[in-house]
Image (cartoon, helix red, strand yellow):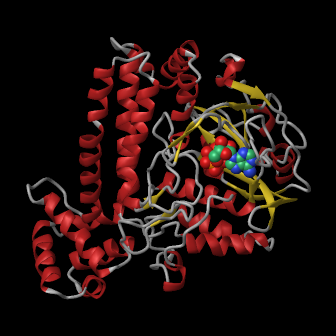
Amino acid sequence: MSRKGLDELLLASRFSQLPESFYSPVSLQPLKNPHLVAFNTDAADLIGLDPCQASPEQLSDRFGGHQPLVGSNPIASVYSGHQFGGYTPQLGDGRAALLGDVTGCDGQRWELQLKGSGKTPYSRHGDGRAALRSVIREYLCSEALATLGIPTSRALCIIGSETQIYRESIEFAASMVRICPSHIRFGHFEYFYYTRRPEQLKQLADFVIEHHYPDCAKMDNPYLAMFSVVVERTARLIAQWQTVGFCHGVMNSDNMSILGFTLDYGPFGFLDDYQPGYICNRTDEHGRYAYQQQPSVAMWNCVCLAQSLTGLIKQADLEVALKRFQPVYAIAYTEQMKLRLGMAGKTDADGKVIEEYLQLLEQAECDYNAAFLALEKAVSGDAEAITLLLGSTSAVTQWLAVYLERVEKDALPLMARNNPRVIMRSYLAQHVIERAEQGNFDDLAQLQAALRDPYSDNFDIYSQPTPESGKNISLSCSS
Ligand SMILES: Nc1ncnc2c1ncn2[C@@H]1O[C@H](COP(=O)(O)OP(=O)(O)OP(=O)(O)O)[C@@H](O)[C@H]1O
């Protein structure tokens, strides 16, 4: 299939074929002097957009809200959700508009959403805008997770502007185009459950099955089949986050994707030192969303989804499906950690090797991702780097002996394929953001290029452990 120009891309969104109780039509509010900050050719590839037929002027016009993209009928969807454990009855796309769908060259259908596009009926007290800094973080991190093979929404471009917004200080607003096969969240289901509209809830479930889980339609109980897959996908997603040290920061049920994708990049962070209790969200005083809590809170969110499906699925069946979360998570996590450690095959002691390794990392307070790279050196015969990080206590020496006995020498290529060199560390993003706020987007492009190729050894400056001054950055939800 040939690539298309910007104005040839859009199809009516399938979501907008649902009745209007699912969304509200919105109009985009123009940004002042919009300009292109970043463009992602990988995302363009996915949606079959020819970059040569999408000039910076066109992109900033269309996505800065000045001229609608041909074929777009922007809508904002309504949802609700559990935020920090409490139910919020009405949320919805308060600063994002679904422009339409796009079919990629491979036939995959994507929704095109514009984040930061202005107020919608669901904006509550918000201004409908997104700060340039937060959009840059989402843009970079969604691409970082994608290249690590983690399901996520993707980012096509960022449009900067001279529109001023007030957060903790005055900042510039920006918009970002994101793409995802669906932006439906657990919270969409919760909204129709708590407003006691079983008809719409069923319609939503049918919609999700028809367009996103067609295999479930063939099952005896398609709703149960769908729910079971959602639970399993969510468990696998969280296993991937844990393995790479990604902390989402705001795992409210309105941020949980019905497709098991990573959605909503707010105050996220990657582990610097291995601290299981690490909290990347400054607003999260009690650590509800701390790194080590992510598996249990994901399960909690699945329970919220289960509750909203009680009209379609028997309680006992929901419980059976929920029980799959823990084993699916545990198997996926162990498998992925073994890949990072270069442990092919299977022995009974594998779980213990992983557990003890993590204990040593925690005790030594050493950089989580850098430790795997040091282990690669140990496997190649040079143990100095890892003993420098972990110390040379008898516990370390003993563990290392057991580990080196367990791995084969040919583990190195396996480890190199599974241990990213480039991690989207918050301090790197901070630097890029400061430069972008001064109008320099070169560093952003450079970091983006490195994140595209995270297993490469060519980006030495981006592969270093976080310096002391940049560690454990904790961000607020303000974005
Ligand atoms: N400045 C704002 N104006 C209007 N609504 C907002 C604003 N900031 C957040 N919201 C809305 O508040 C809710 C919670 O915000 P949250 O920060 O979790 O999401 P987000 O980053 O805006 O969106 P998404 O989950 O789509 O990435 C969302 O429904 C969001 O649309």
Residue 453 horizontal side relative to residue 387, left or right = right
Which residue is rendered at x = 12% and y = 66% of the image?
406
For the C terminus, the quadrant is: bottom right
Could you tell me residue 205's position as x and y percent? 50, 20
Q: Quadrant of residue 457?
A: bottom left
Task: Please indicate, yes or no, whether residue 107 appears anywhere in the rendered image.
Answer: no
Q: Is residue 384 left or right of residue 30?
A: left
Number of on-image labels? 0
In the displayed structure, does residue 322 sit left or right of residue 9? left
**Percent coordinates x, y for residue 216 in the rendering:** 39, 19
Image quadrant assignment for residue 412: bottom left
Residue sitting nearer the eye, 403 or 294? 294
As drawn, 440 above or below 160 = below
Quadrant housing the N terminus: top right
Q: Residue at x 38, y 70 (%)?
A: 369
Tell me if residue 29 comes above or below residue 304 in the rendering: below
- Residue 154 screen position, x and y as percent: 59, 47
Instruction: Give the image location of residue 203, x and y in percent.
Output: 56, 15
Residue drawn at the location 14% of the way across and 73% of the way down: 404
**Residue at 44%, 60% in the rendered image:** 287
Q: Is residue 437 visible?
A: yes
Q: Nearer the viewer, residue 458 or 12?
A: 12
Q: Nearer the viewer, residue 262 or 373?
A: 262
